[in-house]
Image (cartoon, coloured by chain):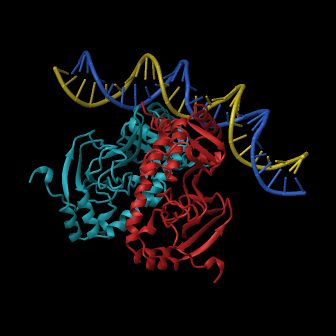
Chain colours: A cyan, B red, C yellow, D blue
DNA sequence: CGTGACCTTTGATGTGGATCAACGGCGAGA
DNA sequence: TCTCGCCGTTGATCCACATCAAAGGTCACG
């Protein structure tokens, strides 16, 4: 058995992502509470799942799902983060979401992939064949109910992002993003605003941020600088942000009048 | 039995919409092929469904799902079209999709509605309670597989729209929209480009178009005029458009280099 | 057939964010 | 420690689209 074929241990977070952002999930290392399918699965079910996948390790910045290519596999991320995006021929890029440990990728593609996925750091993931994942669903119909829930949550997030991209100003986009990122990291007290004065890890380059928010890196940088000038955030270093006044950020994000 | 409680005849198109645009579907009048759940349902199943809904008739321009309100009901549209949208407090609006006969609405909302829905013309629809729709799912698990398929298609459409809103120019947005609308109306030869020189009904105001594409009505009007000037489309009247050169439109929409 | 309300189109002007350009900070590698 | 390359920041300028304004078009209604 080669390393590529090593059986996956599925007793790890198994949240679902169906092409996009998904329910919050963290890797074994971080200690945070996990969400997703694993909550619903028995040991037997986990064992069954584990017989259907291959484990792979990918270096940083490798594109393992390419838009337009035949959709052969489904992936479950074990560690590391990936960006999901669509591109235009002239190089313009729109990041449609980020996927971290526990997310599923590729389920939305019927025939050809409709988006690309690229690792942002070294990534470990499990690969399912089409028939493998179908067998999993046949065996555990409960998965489908769960998946449907997550897919519908994805639709809600997609609508939020459409409002952001279609109608919000640069500053509103940045404020909205900071709050939604805090929510994704479960830094919000019971679904409300994030707690202030806590350093929030932000493992995204300015380029990623710009391509996610439909802006340029210069505008992203300027908007962050303005929020810093106005005392709403602090930027101790490039990969951390401290939210000083979450309520003020929320007022900007939602264009409170 | 009041008219509101009249039993629905579910022997009509029953495609699914989960908050957004959905798989193509047309009403009984139009004669086009229908997609969706009805393909998968027996007469018994349709009968079961019919006992779970109320039928309602709404006038034009009535908002029957309001963002932020408690999510009590699910709806299945029988006739007429509705717009789905999110708003900001200052009145900016983003239409996230349109739903026509056969579409389901409200499934994505867990607690509060995350979007609003407004009729664009007089609309007949069926209303399900939360427990009613749950019973339907318990009775016919096949529905869930179908719903999952449709939800995933919705995610794909959502990603397309994010690319449009985040990275495309006004002209590219209009061209993309015209092609996707033709696709929705099933005017495309086997999933390819729409047939040229056929009048395409376009029952949207310029305002709706602008709010869907993240533009202003003036920019929409100017872009359509330019396409007309360049000989790519004709506009016989405000509610019809003829695509003269679909390939050229596609080149613009996809920013072919 | 006239009136008025509303929508669309077109033109003139304004502006938010893109583009172009220069500089600075930081980590890798010799 | 120096240098190089890559990012991120900041400033100057530009431009695509928004905003402001006005003139048709269309349709309902008396």
Residue B129, how many percent across, how many down? 53, 74
> Can residue B70 be seen by looking at this rendering?
no
Report the quarter where the N terminus of chain B lies: bottom right
Quadrant hosting residue A68:
top left
Q: Nearer the viewer, residue A232 or B52?
A: B52
Write the residue at 39% across / 55% down: A186
Q: Which residue in the rendered view is the most extreme toward the bottom?
A: B1
Residue A239, how many percent across, how many down? 36, 39
Q: Is residue A145 left or right of residue D5?
A: right
Write the residue at 61% across / 39% down: B234
Write the residue at 32% across / 53% down: A105
Report the quarter where the C terminus of chain B lies: top left
Residue B23, how many percent across, how many down? 46, 58
> Can residue B43 be seen by looking at this rendering?
yes
Q: Is residue B42 above or below residue B201?
A: below
Q: Is residue A3 left or right of residue B82?
A: left
Q: Is residue A119 above or below residue D30?
A: above
Q: Is residue B235 above or below residue B135?
A: above
Residue A43, how many percent across, how many down? 21, 70
Q: Nearer the viewer, residue B38 or A108?
A: B38
Q: How many marks?
A: 0
Write the residue at 22% across / 54% down: A126
Q: Is residue B52 above or below residue A22?
A: below
Q: Which residue in the rendered view is the most extreme toward the front?
A: B197
């Amino acid at each position: 058995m080669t390393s590529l074929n090593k059986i996956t241990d599925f007793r790890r977070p198994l949240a679902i992502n169906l092409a996009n952002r998904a329910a919050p999930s963290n890797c074994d290392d971080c200690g945070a509470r996990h969400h997703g399918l694993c909550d619903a699965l028995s040991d037997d079910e986990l064992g069954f799942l584990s017989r259907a996948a291959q484990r792979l390790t990918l270096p940083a910045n490798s594109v393992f799902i390419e838009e337009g290519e035949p959709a052969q596999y489904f992936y479950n991320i074990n560690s590391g983060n990936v960006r999901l995006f669509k591109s235009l021929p002239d190089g313009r890029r729109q990041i449609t979401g980020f996927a971290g440990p526990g997310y599923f990728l590729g389920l939305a593609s019927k025939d050809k992939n409709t988006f690309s996925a690229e690792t942002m750091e070294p990534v470990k993931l499990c690969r399912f064949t089409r028939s493998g994942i179908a067998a999993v669903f046949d065996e555990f119909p409960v998965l489908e109910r769960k998946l449907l829930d997550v897919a519908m949550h994805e639709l809600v997030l997609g609508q939020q992002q459409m409002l952001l991209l279609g109608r919000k100003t640069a500053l509103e986009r940045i404020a909205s993003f900071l709050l939604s990122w805090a929510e994704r990291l479960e830094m919000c007290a019971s679904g409300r605003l994030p707690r202030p004065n806590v350093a929030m890890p932000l493992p995204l380059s300015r380029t990623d941020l710009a391509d996610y928010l439909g802006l340029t890196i210069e505008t992203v940088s300027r908007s962050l600088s303005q929020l810093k000038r106005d005392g709403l955030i602090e930027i101790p270093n490039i990969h951390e942000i401290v939210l000083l006044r979450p309520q003020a950020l929320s007022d900007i994000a939602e264009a409170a009048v």
